[in-house]
Amino acid sequence: MTDDRDNQFDDLFEPFELPDAPPETEPPRTSGGRNTAETAEQPAIGAVMCPSCGASNPDFNRHCEQCGARLSQDPLPIAPPPMSRTSPGGRALGVLAAVVLVVALGALMFNIFRGGSEDPTAASTSSTTSSSTIPPVVTEVFASSVEASSELQGWEATNLIDGDPSTSWNDEGLRGKDAWLRFRFPRPVTLKEIAFQNLEDEVRFKRNYKIQGFSITVDDLPVEINLRLDNTNQEQRVQVASLETTDLLVRVLSTFTAESADDQPPFDELALQGVRFFGTER
């Protein structure tokens, strides 16, 4: 009874046996009695023979497993160059250059579209108008009234602006001391020159005092202009500058003295025949 159970248990766990190995065959020998494998190994399929030591290597090897020699003559792969690392300053410069380029392109496009929409006749008209602007012409401007520090009867200050060469202004025996003349204009004028005319008559010119140094003050500029005349009976023009003058004051600072002429004694009065103004009216 016990033997039967043991046999059944043995049947369940029957040992597993490998099939018989093929018989070993003796490698062929050469005429010298040596094994052919010892003289030259033939590379297996999918293997690469080392050009240095002749050892067989898998075809995926790049170097020999025996001697370390390189198996393939193909060029080795070259690693890509490392990416250049830019500094913060370089990045900022690049951003600035990009912004400048964008702005320049925007301005160019704006000018192109704007220029195409403009009316060429308007530009031509504007150019013609600006080129045809004529600077104001300097002409004689006239004072509407004149006052004096003093005047001799019959030789009033209004004779200075009446345009009559036979009339003149004489102060009342003061020899020109502290003398002054005030001219007024009906509308603002821009003055460029003032012309002073002493007495043209030679004898009268010598016998009266004449203006030498004087100052001019206008109501539109807080500047006093100091000028000087020559001792002559020819008209003398002096340069002045003003903007919108309506009131002009002439103060006598010094005089040329009177002298005898034709055996006649000198006068004590300061004399002036006329005053003219040149500029433009506003």
Image: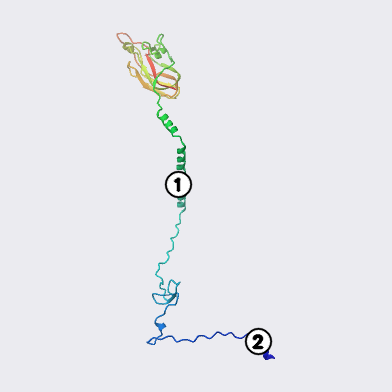
Which residue lies under the disc numbered 2? 9
Which is nearer the eye, 44 or 199?
44
**Residue drawn at the location 45% of the way across and 40% of the way down:** 112
Please tell me how many numbered marks the rendered image carries.
Answer: 2
Q: What element carries label 2?
A: helix
Rendering coords of residue 171 (x, y %): 40, 12
Which is nearer the eye, 202 or 270?
202
Q: What kind of residue is marked 2?
A: Phe
Q: What element carries label 1?
A: helix
Q: Is residue 228 visible?
A: no
Rendering coords of residue 244 (x, y %): 45, 23
Q: Residues within 10 Å of mark 2 (few under 14, many from 20)?
A: few
Q: What kind of residue is marked 1?
A: Leu
Q: How crowded is mark 1: few (under 14 residues within 10 Å), some or many (20 or more)?
A: few
In this picture the colour scheme is: rainbow
Quadrant (top left, top right, bottom left, bottom right) of the C terminus:
top left
Rendering coords of residue 70 (x, y %): 41, 72
Of marks 1 and 2, which one's residue comes earlier in the chain?
2
**Residue drawn at the location 39% of the way across and 17% of the way down:** 276
Rendering coords of residue 208 (x, y %): 35, 12
Quadrant (top left, top right, bottom left, bottom right) of the N terminus:
bottom right
Image vertical order of residue 210 relative to residue 241, above or below: above
Which residue lies under the disc numbered 1? 101
